[in-house]
Image (tube, rainbow, N blue to C red):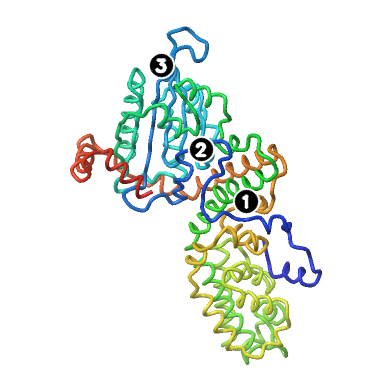
Amino acid sequence: MKSWKKRLNKEFDAMAPEMSDEVRAAPILAERKEYKPEEKSAYSGRKAGFWGLAGVAAVLVVVFVSLAVAGVFGGAENDETYVFALEINPAVSFVTDTDGTVLSVNSLNADADVVLSDESTLNAIKGKSLDEAVVAYTDTAARLGYIDLNTAAGAVRLSGSEGKGQKLLSGAAENLRGYFKDKGAYVAVAEDVVGVSEMGEILGVEGAKQTSDLVGAMQNAAVAYGERIAAGVNADGLISLHESYIVDSQLYDYISTALLAGTDDFVSNARALAEIGILNLKITFSRDNPSAVLTDYWSVTERFDEAYFSDKLMAMTDEMEALLTDYAENFGVDITSKDEFYDELYDFAVLAGKEFEDLVFSLASSAIESITDPQAIFEAFEEFAAIDFGKILENLTPQTILSSLSEYRGILARSGIDPNLTETLSHVPTTVAEYISEMRSVVTAIYETRTEIFRERYDRVRDALTDEEYSAFVDGIAREYGSTENFWENCVGVQ
């Protein structure tokens, strides 16, 4: 954990910054667009973020199907294969045989890489029916917070080409309806038809003339979108991938969401530390303090027997003991010395701003006798307790985190983020293999953290919808928007 002592060591030893000049100078993309040197996905730019949509469009699911020509896999002449794409925002494609058994699955954007990083989800998709696959994928996306099953109204569109594939399409659509009804989720399902050209745009496959082109492209491609976009890139391309995919598409949203999810804890933690800090100052400057020099609470209670304490000082030390006990119970840290207190406080001081950070650094590293204006310090701690940490966390940018990563490590660790993962922010891979390894570790960590962050929302008890309730919901959409598909298009427009 980052502490004021590390800053002191840096100033004494003139340590070099942890990030290279190359990383510091590297540009950070202002827009969140995934790097696509060879592939173009229609969904790559539709980044809803970790929280999803706040209004009626909290859930978007699109499934497309196109019928392949006979004999794509070298089987019997009457063998047929189909390619599907499911978008929630995490977009994914499925290739199935004529019976609807899933032969391969590919993620189509960065969020889908997180969903498919889970081995159990992959096992629930590969070799299973399309009906099962779309539900398995959708359920994992919901667990990870990409779908809010508590939304007031959401939309799903299930589309496919004319022909035999429509039977699979209808079955998958009905299964999704059943899933949402069982979950008590108000999510409508619209069905439509899409051609090969549009499917190619969805999958990021250029020049497709027939469905066999799409099937071949997806079956021969890596499962992860993040791996496919790295094929054949040079050193400059790896730098761009690191910035756009690793940092912007994955880590930044991940870190921002983890921080925002813990805003209430941050505020409570900061206020608790402010209370401890103010009471410690009262004890330090109290006329009843038995020390001949200004001495903090921890030093006073260690050096002097309670027999030397006045009733007033005893009341303050008892109050401090209660505050420290509560802090240990609520935040899992026993503060047993002044140094440990400032270790805790320094992480929050970094977020509070340079002025308060400098004050904390001064209090931690300098003799307390040098304080000439105790009242100003009391006021600084009171202002610290009133800081809107939610706004500060919401406004954090990739540039801010990257430029001061060493300062933010402690606060990131408090959010449950693996400290080793933050090292990825400052490390630019030099080979494709190194990039892929980095990418896999990042999406796995994001999967684990998102599961915890959104567990309560996913597990929230909801009564299953009856057929009548679900039909009334769909009928209401049709009356207001003209059709379920129009409602879906409206949701896409909001997104």
Say what amino acid the circle numbered 3 marks: Asp
Q: Which residue is mark 3?
A: 99
Q: Are marks 2 and 3 in contact (CB under 8 Å)?
A: no
Q: CA distance from mark 2 to mark 3?
A: 30 Å
64 displayed left or right of 219: left
The disc at residue 40 is: 2
Q: Which residue is mark 1?
A: 418
Image spot of residue 10 (x, y percent): 76, 68
Say what amino acid the circle numbered 2 marks: Lys
Closer to us: mark 2 or mark 3?
Answer: 2
Residue furthest top as drawn: 76
Q: CA distance from mark 2 to mark 1?
A: 32 Å
Please tell me whether mark 3 sits on a helix, a strand or a loop.
loop
Image spot of residue 65 (x, y percent): 39, 26
Please tell me whether mark 2 sits on a helix, a strand or a loop.
loop
Q: In the image shown, does 235 or 295 lie closer to the viewer?
A: 235
